[in-house]
Image (tube, grey):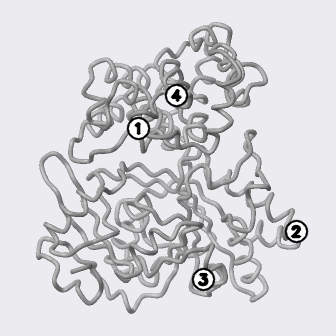
Amino acid sequence: MRLSTAAASRLSADVVRPGYDRAAQAVGIVHFGIGAFHRAHQAWYTDLAMGHGDRDWMITGASLRSADVATQMNPQDGLYTLSERSAASIGVRLVGSVRRVLVASEQPEAVIAELAAPSTRIASFTVTEKGYCRAADGSLDFNLAHSQSLYYFVTQGLRRRRDAGLPGLTLLSCDNLADNGRQLEALMQAYIARHEPDLAAWFADNCTCPATMIDRIVPATTDADRKAVAGISGLDDAAAVVTEPFSQWVIEDRFAGARPRWDAVGAELVADVAPYETAKLRMLNGAHSALAYRGLMAGYGYVHEAIADPDLRAMAQRLMLEEAAPTIAAAPGQDLPAYAAALIERFANPALNHRLIQIAMDGSQKIPQRWLETLAANQRQGRSCPAILSAINAWMNHVRGDNTAIWGPVDDPMADRLRALWQAGERSAVARALFGAGGLFAQTWTATDDDLAALS
């Protein structure tokens, strides 16, 4: 039997239930990109907050293109299970904070109406780096930011709110972008200035875009995971999420209006997210990507397999402690060596089965903030970064197609462009076209002649 409101009473006693009446709660959040990552953090934190007495913070999910998540969740009335797995144990919780999922490409009016509803106070996003439609220099690519992008739906919802005399919204980016709040704000301003210029002043006065940092490893859910969850819960769950016990969410305390009491259930509200965000991007995400590309080349499929390799483990430790950590201005009490040690332990968790090919997706959108900013910071101090350079070499091999025979086609929005570079020149020419003066990524980091030699 499949999970649903009617079937929930049949769940095993081992499953923790929501501590509130779902039917009595209004929607307060519209979330774009309601994949496993969102369901393992923001929706989970929101469920916990309502369990502690918060009201009217149910979530309407919006998928920009694919109907897959709607197909998973809507027949289940928005319910799903979250399983926290370690080598020693597994705990399962029923999460009730999602009301329904809309497919924006098929239901644009419904998405806009939800954003414009009086009860909605937050619009949030996990659309991955490519969902922000940025050009190579970080500005908004208006060809990508079309009527199926987040910018169109949010702008139309805000316009209706203004016309109805309603308050603005907090726009909460939960993606792995450096200074994600300011980036979202600048991109929204650019879109509004072109398409709805009379809304620009109202947006500036009534909406905010706080920065956030989320740290939780969330592998893609497999059929084997769903079968295991059904064995524990007693019901089939098409939207099941599997994650690690660790979770961290740091949020800039800059909201346009009311918010859930996420800080009462473990989130941290701070004045400056930057030290936490930089550590996560450069240490966790940087090491993850390095393990992905080098691990795939070595024939490994999962993170825990790659980190068990002594050479790759040493590479990851060097990247975090000797290359990334010296570039981070830590906040008071932020222990970067302890963070690195904890990350190695988390990477080694064999219960997650986090696939390297999942981490390797969309590398062209990820490496600027995960590797290149670290390279640039070290370059200014005259330090070299052999671990990251080895990872870049592995990434270059990956986008050339070296891993396709085993792991399938390169999944990257720039795959065709990167493949064309390889077809047009030798390795040294490709390295220069990517990272040399005037290269594709030179706005973040320009390689020296020694760096280019290492990449050639």
Q: Which residue is mark 3?
A: 114
Residue 146 located left or right of residue 297: right
Reading the chain from its start, which is encountered first: label 1 or label 4? 4
Q: Is residue 138 above or below residue 123?
A: above
* Residue found 78% across the figure and 24% down from its top: 438
* Residue found 58% across the figure and 14% down from its top: 455
Mark 2 falls on what kind of element? helix
Residue 88 located left or right of residue 249: left
**Tag of residue 197:** 2
**Tag of residue 407:** 1
Q: Position of residue 6 (x, y in %)?
A: 26, 90
Closer to viewer: mark 1 or mark 2? 1
Answer whether residue 333 is visible to the viewer in this image.
Answer: no
Q: In the rendered image, which quarter contains the N terminus?
A: bottom left
Q: Is residue 160 above or below residue 428?
A: below
* Residue found 63% across the figure and 73% down from its top: 105
Q: Tell me, yes or no, whether the two marked residues, 3 and 2, touch with CB atoms within 8 Å.
A: no
- The type of residue carrying mark 2 is Pro
**Tag of residue 395:** 4
Mark 1 falls on what kind of element? helix
Asked whether 38 or 6 is in front, the reply is: 6
Q: Position of residue 314 (x, y in %)?
A: 33, 19
- Measure the alpha-carbon separation of dots 4 and 3: 41 Å
Q: Position of residue 391 (x, y in %)?
A: 48, 24
Reading the chain from its start, which is encountered first: label 4 or label 2? 2
Reading the chain from its start, which is encountered first: label 3 or label 2? 3
